[in-house]
Amino acid sequence: MSIPVEIENLEDALSEYGMNPYLITIDNEAHPHITHVTLSRDSLGFVCGIGKKTSANVLERPSVALLWPPMKQDSHSLIVDGVMEVIDTQEGPQGRIAPKAAILHRPAVKKDTDQNCDSDCQSITMDKER
């Protein structure tokens, strides 16, 4: 079950979900690498500290996902797809994420209908290029 949210409204969703999602990258063997991050906002997107493995993954495959689990049972997860770049700083590597699309997602309750949909996902679209 998805709920579309315009990317311009992502800030509203973050006011509810917070700035501490899971960051998902992919390694050389196509295995997911999941880490918990703290985001801050800058003029080009979101920034977070990253480790060596995440940095290496992003340099090879810059497409990433951010996942905020549901805040309570039967509520939606927030999933944001984006492109990350690695920025070297004095404090260590940081990642800057430019969001491209997002959805609020949860499993749908099965109904007695002929519909093939088993979720109520809704897109959070990205209209402007970053």
Image (spheres, rainbow, N blue to C red):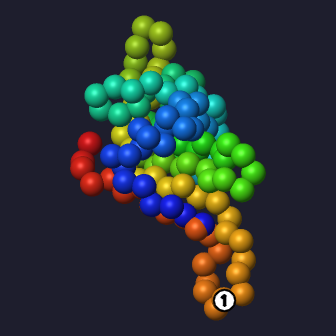
SS class of the residue under badge 1? Answer: loop
Image quarter where the N terminus lies is bottom right
The crowd level at tag 1 (other Cα within 10 Å; few <14, some 14-19, many 20+) is few
Which residue shows up at 38% across the image and 46% down it? 9
Which residue shows up at 45% across the image and 60% down it? 4
Residue 48 x/y as whole percent? 48, 25
* The residue positioned farthest toward the bottom in the image shown: 114
Image quarter where the C terminus lies is top left
Above or below 55: residue 6: below
Indicate left or right for 58 with 51 as reference: left
Query: Which residue type carries mark 1?
Result: Thr
**Residue 72 in view, yes or no:** yes
Above or below 92: residue 52: below
Q: Residue 121 is drawn in which quadrant?
A: bottom right
Residue 20 x/y as whole percent? 58, 30
Indicate left or right for 43 with 6 as reference: left
Q: Residue 99 is drawn in which quadrant?
A: top left
**Residue 24 in view, yes or no:** no
Q: Nearer the viewer, residue 17 or 102?
A: 17
Q: Nearer the viewer, residue 17 or 79?
A: 17
Residue 97 x/y as whole percent? 41, 36
* The residue positioned farthest toward the top in the image shown: 90
Which residue shows up at 39% across the image and 27% down it? 41
Above or below 125: residue 40: above
Identify the residue position indicated by label 1 in the image: 113
Residue 124 x/y as whole percent? 42, 55
What is the total number of numbered labels drawn onto the structure image? 1
Which residue shows up at 57% across the image and 38% down it? 17
